[in-house]
Image: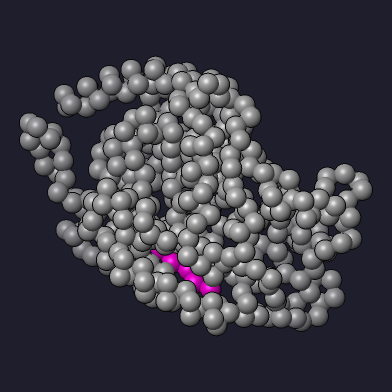
Amino acid sequence: MLRCLTAGESHGPELTGIIEGMPAGVPLTGDYISAQLERRQSGYGRGGRMQIEKDKARITAGVRGGLTTGAPICVVIENRDWSNWAEVMCSGTDAHIGERVVSKPRPGHADLSGAVKYNHRDIRNILERASARETAARVAVGTVGRALAEQFGIEITAHVTRIGSTVSSAGQLSSGEIRSRTERSELLCADPKAEQMMKEEIDRAKKEGDSLGGIFEIIVTGVPMGLGSHVHYDRKLDGRLAQALMSIQAIKGVEIGIGFIAGEQPGSEVHDELFYDTERKFYRKTNRAGGLEGGITNGEPLVLRAVMKPIPTLYKPLQSVDLLTKQPYEASVERSDVCAVPAAAVVGEAAVAFEIGKALIEKFGGDSLAEMQRNYQSYMEYVKQV
């Protein structure tokens, strides 16, 4: 079973990801992971932290000569801002705990709930881990899953379909066209006209001290029929993918295929009819299910969407109450993103990639990539004969 853990704080010395269960022989390098980390940091509307951190992945275990060994993989991402926080954030008893104490919870964050739950009087103990900075480690471990998926011809593409009130019209493009266009986009948007309007919305929000959310879509092609299972709740791949996306900071909704629209349409316009010919075998002319039926992949592309709320750290102060004094105050911020939907889309790719990698290992087993590929080829031959 493929599993992972991340550790580290926003202003700690480093972020760490550990991945267990990756078969031996999968090509993997620090540069490959760093390329995805760079994508996460880019995007129009990002804040000052992205000017400080230039994330690079350093693999410290589980890879030798550019290939995984079958042992646990450890990936480290150093926080460049650590030098400014070492005395406050160090783990030793000599830490300057009394400096930079945070007692004012910010609306929309985990600050207040986390402080109450873990009995902290200094909210910094919550915000350091709840920070979206953690998603850098999430991208690193997810990219390891992507490395495995690519060995089976699976490609994962994300694009931003909405920011604020502006909607992209790129929904009818192929995943290849979307991927090509988003490589040239500052907002990971495949519709140039919509992208310009999105930028204008972001500029207006920044001027007004506000923030913007949006929606991104992830398309996974090359997925074989049969990943996941119908037999139990925690083996349903649609549930696992939805959970993976919902676990990303600021994500408030997930849909698969036509998603919520299915509740508005009659069954005849929701379900995908089945057809058969000797060349294509079983196929569908539509993909309203988004590639998943009964918790199992059906051979069509996976299509998932997630909505990201506007970032709650605003330059336009919101009302809150001090945890210690109980006095009201206006929340303030020194630096923040105006819009981070493109970054969330990259994190979403990683989250999906990890679940796909996990599903591949569950289905095709094996301690090495070569063994998995033999099992995969045998299964695909069987599928062709059905």
Image side of residue 268 versus residue 126, left or right? left
82 versus 277 height, above or below: below
Q: Residue at x 74, y 51 (%)?
A: 82
The answer to whether one can see residue 23 in this image is no
In the picture provided, is 311 more to the left or to the right than 353?
right
Residue 131 location (% of width, % of height): 64, 57
In this figure, what is the number of numbered marks? 0
Image-based side of 197 in relation to 46, left or right: left
Q: Is residue 109 visible?
A: yes
Q: Residue furthest left?
A: 278
Q: Which residues are magenta?
A: 211-217
Residue 373 or residue 235, whichever sits in front: 373
Q: How is the image coloured?
A: one colour
The answer to which of 25 and 228 lies nearer the viewer is 25
* Residue at the spot 23% in from the left edge and 56% down from the top edge: 173
Residue 112 position in % (x across, y down): 72, 66
Considering the image in quadrants, where does the C terminus appear?
A: top left
User: Which residue shows up at 36% across the image and 71% down it?
Assistant: 196
Is residue 216 highlighted in magenta?
A: yes
Relative height, residue 6 to residue 198 (above, below): above
Residue 280 percent across, percent down from the top left? 12, 35
Q: Residue at x 30, y 51 (%)?
A: 180
Instruction: Say which quarter of the image contains residue 132.
Output: bottom right
Is 63 colored magenta in this rendering? no
Q: Up-down: is 322 above or below 35? A: below
Q: Position of residue 42 (x, y in %)?
A: 50, 57
